Amino acid sequence: MIRQLNTGLNIQKEKEMVTKMIELYCRRKHQHRDELCKECQNLKTYAHMRLSLCRFGEEKSACSNCSVHCYKPKYRLKMKSVMRYSGPWMLLYHPVYSVKHLLNKSKKQMKSVE
């Protein structure tokens, strides 16, 4: 059975956010200015694929709150490093994305409590 790819608005926003975080990480940690290094490009491609195949689709929560860990351990560790590093910097470099992400995360956490 072939699963249909998620192409909804929320998934696209998640992809944009992940891309911005990986770009920030690569620029500051790997000193790549114009394009991503091979390792970060690979992580971005993998993250986009996982988001496209997410079983929760448009109803997905933040990956950190998810009950299903769909990343392979190697990628999960790398993404955790990227998020841990880029998260605080996103407020400075991409404040609009940061605020939207925090609002979205808290809104989804409130739904899960109800």
Image: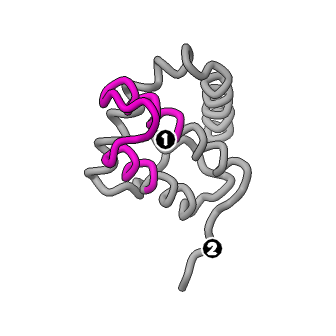
- Judged left or right of residue 81, residue 96 is right
Q: CA distance from mark 2 to mark 1?
A: 23 Å
Horizontal side of residue 90 vs 46, given as left or right: right
Mark 2 falls on what kind of element?
A: loop
Vertical position of residue 23 compared to residue 98: above or below: below
Out of 110 and 18, give the one closest to the viewer: 18
Q: Which residues are magenta?
A: 19-45
SS of the residue at dot 1?
helix
Residue 4: mark:
2
Q: Which of marks 1 and 2 precedes in the sequence?
A: 2
Q: Position of residue 86 (x, y in %)?
A: 43, 26
The vertical placement of 5 against 24, above or below, is below
- Which amino acid type is marked by label 1? Asn
Q: Position of residue 49 (x, y in %)?
A: 49, 60
Q: Nearer the viewer, residue 109 or 69?
A: 69
Q: Nearer the viewer, mark 2 or mark 1?
A: 2
Among all residues in the image, which is located at the extreme front? Answer: 34
Furthest residue in direction right, as rendered:
9
Question: Which quadrant would the N terminus be assigned to in this image?
Answer: bottom right
In the foreground, 78 or 93: 93
In this figure, which residue is indicated by the disc labeled 1? Answer: 65
Q: Is residue 15 visible?
A: yes
Q: Classify 10 Å Cα crowding around label 2: few (below 14), some (14-19), many (20 and above).
A: few
Within-10-Å neighbours for mark 1: few <14, some 14–19, many 20+:
few
Q: Is residue 95 magenta?
A: no
Residue positioned 48% across, 58% down in the render: 50
Q: Residue at the spot x=68%, y=39% of the render?
A: 111
Which circle marks residue 25 in the picture?
none
Q: Quadrant of residue 6?
A: bottom right
Residue at the location (49% across, 47% down)? Answer: 66
Magenta residues, dominant SS class: helix
Q: Amino acid at mark 2?
A: Gln
